[in-house]
């Protein structure tokens, strides 16, 4: 039995954590000045309530889809009072939220100090897919008894040093991390794939990892003088919900796409104002945490928002034959409101009338030939289904080229140029992509073992041959390679996050560590109980923990850290590494057995030390 979906790819490292910042209800929200108005039904006066920001995100992993219903989040005050903070059931495909955080609500809850919570998840209609040998496969989520999961309540204990304090005027932040790797034991040999789930959720007040944020909802008003606009927040693909109002600020460099047309800065805000109240909007940007203000880098509005007028297909192009393209495993957002991850190949039709643009670039109207193999796209058109096969016709529609993520090992560098031995494109195995036709001639088709990237002025000085690197950018138009890709952002080996994952089988072990104290944890890499998972993943490179000549050490980061101990239906969270290790030692001494451990940070091979900003340890139950 395998311990996570990525083991099917022999990459038994750690799935990155996804974070949720969940919170208030009642219909309150931010007004155009950034202040929050409390709901009258929840509080007798404005001074009785305070704001709490809500958002959900996920990180890169091998679950292709992971859709479950988040039913509620109940917070408990220090005095024992319970407050329900999630007003509507929200269906979330966590696997689609990679490198993003989605704001869910900006609302208000009664003042007070909140010390713990309970999240209720409903797996009754869960839709989960994993990749097995490059093919999307359905996965059934079951409990430890082998029966399909229904509604699951997970208790969340807040760090004693960091309770949530709600007071008027200043929004609070609460981050909940659901560790998919720690939460699942996946067997890819069954049909469908079986995933045993024990949800592992940790909570903290400060984000451990910074990510881009997304906020969406219908337009309420535009404040041209204040360089901002106000929306009714409506996350994911909700058509009807009152989850508070939210202010989006812009700058002179904010890129707009409104009804398929591109603008920048004030011109984009003017175009948005002309669309009128109720226009669908989506903004991507950053949150100023101290000031709790959100500034957009990119804004989509009107028919440029999925589901407002067109059927929309999101995914990566895996093959092309003329104007017929293939997307293997993609998300279909129907204009009628349904959202479905389709595991089979999806046909995309384009033509001379198809409008194509690169996201975040003004005035970059392109032709359909710009869409090539590997490119992440969002295609707008009309979807049909015949004999179980789905086709999206975008011949009279449009296609947005979105930033595409490459991961691979450096083959060579020269000024302005980089070649990678590709491991994956947007997390998908390179073997699923057919690069036929990408070159200007058959012998210049893109070669994934020597993928040529033009890097412009990006700094390549730290790159070393055979070291991992990540590149973000856009694929060269079809039939025009080489180069194969235009890089916009580069992350070299020194900055690629190391992900440690180790398991001790279904029975666990009482002696997982050689030593544990307030400064470090030293893993016993010769423990006879180590199971299938015992790797440190750095990009595409795997380091076998069992073969390390020096036992690996985990030390805490000097910045914000998040450390957690998970047991069945209960998770304890710590911001202080010393308190975490003391509690972990106590539980092991009381008979708890370690089942698994996941950690992320920077790995120094010379000292065999991982400096981690998060560590999650999964134990059996103790008294």
Image: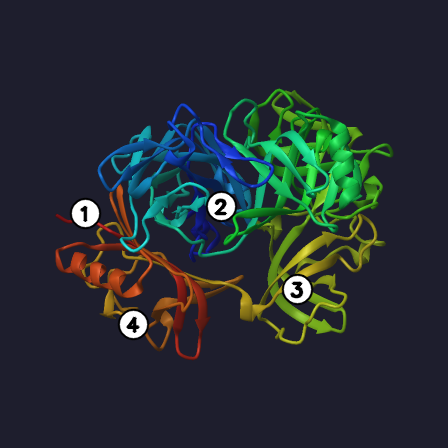
The reply to whether the C-beta atoms of the residues labelled 3 and 1 are less than 8 Å apart is no
User: At x 20% / y 63%, what residue is drawn?
Assistant: 511
Label 2 to label 4: alpha-carbon separation: 30 Å
Q: CA distance from mark 3 to mark 4?
A: 38 Å
State how many labels appear. 4
Q: Quadrant of residue 386?
A: top right
> Sequence order check: which comes first, mark 1 or mark 2?
2
As helix, strand or loop, the secondary structure at mark 3 comes to strand
According to the picture, the residue beneath numbered tag 1 turns out to be: 621
Residue beneath the point at 70% across and 72% down: 413
**Label 2: which residue?**
58
> Which label sits in the foreground, 3 or 2?
2
Residue denoted by label 4 = 519
- The local crowd at label 2, few if under 14, some if 14 to 19, many if 20 or more residues have their Cα within 10 Å, is many
Mark 2 or 4: the one toward you: 4
Q: In whole angstroms, how far apart are the C-alphas of marks 1 and 4?
A: 26 Å
Q: Nearer the viewer, residue 58 or 238?
A: 238
Marked residue nearer the N-terminal end (3 or 1)? 3
Q: Is residue 98 visible?
A: no
The 10 Å Cα crowd at callout 1, few under 14, some 14 to 19, many 20 or more, is some
Closer to the chain start, of discs 2 and 4, is 2
Of the pair 233 and 453, the residue shown nearer to us: 233
> Mark 4 and mark 3 in contact (Cβ < 8 Å)?
no
Circle number at residue 37: none
Disc number lying in front (3 or 1): 1
Percent coordinates x, y for residue 73 in the rendering: 36, 34
Given this view, does label 3 or label 4 mark the residue nearer the observer?
4
Which residue position holds label 3? 420
Nearer to us of marks 1 and 2 is 2
Residue 232 in the image: above or below residue 295: above
Instruction: State the CA–CA distance, disc 3 to disc 2.
Output: 26 Å
């Amino acid at each position: 039995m395998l311990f996570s979906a990525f083991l099917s790819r022999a990459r038994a490292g750690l799935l990155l954590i996804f974070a949720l910042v969940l919170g208030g209800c009642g219909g309150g929200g931010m007004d155009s000045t950034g202040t929050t108005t409390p709901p009258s039904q929840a509080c007798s006066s404005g001074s009785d309530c305070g704001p709490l920001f809500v958002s959900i995100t996920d990180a890169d992993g091998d679950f292709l889809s992971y859709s479950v219903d988040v039913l509620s989040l109940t917070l408990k005050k220090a005095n024992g009072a319970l407050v329900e903070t999630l007003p509507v059931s929200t269906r979330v495909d966590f696997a689609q939220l990679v490198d993003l955080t989605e704001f869910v609500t900006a609302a208000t809850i009664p003042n007070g100090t909140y010390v713990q919570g309970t999240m209720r998840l409903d797996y009754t209609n869960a839709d989960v897919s994993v990749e097995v040998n490059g093919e999307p496969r359905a996965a059934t989520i079951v409990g430890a008894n082998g029966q399909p999961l229904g509604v699951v309540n997970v208790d969340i204990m807040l760090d004693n040093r960091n309770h949530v304090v709600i007071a008027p005027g200043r929004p609070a932040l609460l981050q909940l991390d659901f560790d998919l790797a720690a939460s699942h034991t996946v067997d890819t040999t069954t049909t469908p794939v079986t995933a045993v789930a024990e949800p592992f959720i940790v909570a903290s007040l400060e984000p451990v990892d910074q990510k881009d944020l997304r906020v969406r909802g219908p337009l309420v008003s535009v404040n041209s003088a204040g360089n901002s606009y106000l929306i009714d927040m409506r996350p994911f693909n909700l058509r009807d919900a009152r989850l508070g109002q939210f202010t989006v600020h812009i700058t002179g460099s904010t890129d707009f796409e409104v009804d398929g047309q591109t603008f920048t800065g004030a011109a984009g805000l003017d175009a948005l104002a002309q669309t009128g109240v109720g226009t669908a909007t989506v903004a991507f940007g950053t949150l100023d945490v101290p000031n709790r203000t959100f500034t957009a880098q990119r804004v989509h509005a009107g028919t440029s928002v999925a589901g407002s007028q067109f059927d929309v297909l999101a995914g990566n192009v895996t093959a092309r034959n003329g104007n017929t393209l293939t997307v293997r495993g993609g998300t279909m957002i129907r204009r009628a409101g349904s959202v479905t991850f389709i595991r089979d190949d999806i046909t995309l039709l384009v033509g001379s009338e198809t409008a194509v643009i690169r996201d975040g670039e003004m005035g970059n109207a392109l032709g359909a030939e710009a869409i090539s193999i590997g490119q992440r796209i969002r295609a707008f058109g009309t979807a049909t289904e015949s004999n179980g096969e789905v086709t999206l016709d975008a011949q009279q529609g449009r296609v947005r080229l979105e930033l595409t993520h490459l991961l691979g090992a450096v083959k060579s560098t020269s000024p302005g140029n980089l070649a990678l031995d590709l491991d994956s494109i947007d997390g998908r195995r390179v073997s699923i992509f057919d690069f036929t036709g990408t070159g200007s001639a058959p012998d210049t088709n893109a070669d994934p073992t020597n993928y040529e990237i033009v890097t412009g002025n990006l700094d390549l000085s730290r790159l070393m041959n055979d070291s991992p690197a990540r590149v973000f950018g856009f694929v060269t138009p079809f039939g025009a390679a080489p180069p194969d890709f235009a890089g916009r952002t580069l992350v070299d080996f020194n900055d690629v996050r190391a992900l440690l994952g180790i398991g001790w089988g279904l029975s666990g072990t009482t002696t997982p560590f050689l030593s544990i104290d307030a400064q470090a944890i030293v893993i016993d890499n010769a423990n006879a109980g180590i199971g299938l998972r015992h790797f440190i993943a750095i990009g595409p490179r795997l380091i076998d923990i069992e073969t390390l000549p020096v036992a690996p050490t985990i030390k805490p980061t000097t910045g914000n850290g998040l450390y957690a101990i998970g047991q069945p239906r209960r998770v304890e969270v710590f911001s202080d590494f010393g308190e975490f290790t003391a509690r972990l030692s106590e539980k092991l001494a009381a008979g708890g057995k370690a089942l698994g451990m996941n950690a992320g940070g920077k790995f120094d091979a010379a000292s065999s030390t991982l400096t981690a900003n998060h560590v999650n340890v999964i134990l059996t139950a103790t008294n």
